[in-house]
Amino acid sequence: MSAMLELHGVTKVYGEGAAQVTALRDIDLTVRVGELVAVMGPSGSGKSTLLTIAGSLEEPTSGTVVVNGRQLAGMAYDEQAHLRRTAIGYVFQDFNLLPGLTAVENVAMPLELDGMPARRAQAVAREALAGLGLTERVQHFPDDLSGGERQRVAIARAVVGDRRLVLADEPSGALDSVNGESIIRLLAGIAAQRAAVVVVTHDAKLAAWADRVLFLHDGRLSDRVAAPSGVESLLEPGAP
Amino acid sequence: MSVRHALLALLSQGPTYATRLRLDLQQRTGELWELNIGQIYTTLQRLERDGLVREDDQGGDTRNFALTASGRDELDRWLLTPASLDTPPRDELVIKVLVAVDVPGVDVVDVVLAHRQQVVEAMQAFTRIKASADSDDVALAIMVDAELFRLEGILRWLAAAEVRLLARPPARATAIAGDGAHHPEVVR
């Protein structure tokens, strides 16, 4: 499957002088369509910064970000916004649904913003909601939905219109563990069917649904830890 | 978990034979708990000796086993008895991490990270079992959850250990595990 997201040598520094904070250091990451990747790490480790940079909501201090084969740096503002609306979907911990719009209107909105006629956009949105088991809820306002249902609406909004990079920041943070599991199950299904999904979470039970689990620590990303020589004996199960 | 009580629980649904019990047990535990038929028979014999199970002659050629009234009492008692929540007195992983602090040429943080990787992989393996199971297999989900929550606890402990190890002052680096050994009177 093709690489949907590539980060090459991405570094992000905030502030200057003594107040300078390096949030990300020289990050390399490739996520392909069909893959669910989880990024874990303590708070302040740079997890959310990684997502906002991958989603072109923020620019790296150095390094390059490539989404669906297109390098973000040097792209015009409008072009980036278009890419965000058509290729990238975001899922947030607190759902970020607009309270004055129904479920179907929330999901249809990114399509309408992108110029799709309202009637057509609503039909596509309805289909996306049906795919997530929300057929009966399309006309409900967010306040009339349970937490799990709200997050499913948010996921429908994130994937509607064939967007194939889904970035989720603690998508089940506000839900109990069983509801949280059904959310990550959906994201895993979406990844398997047609998207590259990156989930940032501190919950290892959710991260365990991912094909790859990466750890961010102090701005550095590690997937596999190479054990230095001499350490093997300590790792063998049953070793004294 | 006790095989004795798992068998009593299965027999509470009606008399059956040993091979069936073995299959049911495997199915209920998502094949995580493999027992050979010999272990099943031995346990049934002990249960019979203790009057908790009796042979049931309705089975024709196969030996059927049934729950007795005291077997049912024992099952009810066991289900509500608090489980031991004590940690094992000498947790192997804790010891590995503590010992690694003092092994020359080994960075204890690498040891912590390697175990973290292993625990995450184990969690992924359990999650795959849950992902491929029928969505209405509640018993399996509950059992896999128990493993996942336990492993998650280990992972959080490893994360805390990593933070402590990274934050320790360099001069104290080798003194952590050494304290007890150098001052045996303190331990006593």
Image (cartoon, coloured by chain):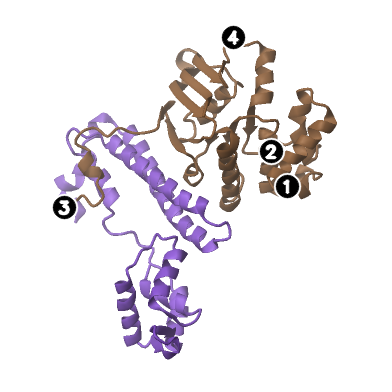
Q: CA distance from mark 4 to mark 1?
A: 40 Å
Which residue in the structure is indicated by mark 2?
Answer: A156
Q: Amino acid at mark 4?
A: Gly
Of residue B173 and residue A127, the one placed in the foreground of this image is: A127
Q: Amino acid at mark 1?
A: Leu
Q: CA distance from mark 1 to mark 2?
A: 10 Å
Residues beneath discs 4 and 2 located on the same chain: yes
Tag of residue B185: 3
Please give left or right for residue A234 compared with residue B66 in the image. left
Look at the image and tell me whether residue A64 can be seen.
Answer: yes
Letter of the chain that mark 3 sits on in the rendering: B
What colour denotes chain B?
purple
What colour denotes chain A?
brown
Helix, strand, or loop for circle 4? Answer: loop
Contact (Cβ within 8 Å) of mark 3 with mark 4? no
Tag of residue A74: 4
Residue B8: image quadrant is bottom left
Q: Amino acid at mark 2?
A: Ala
Tag of residue A134: 1
Q: CA distance from mark 4 to mark 2?
A: 30 Å
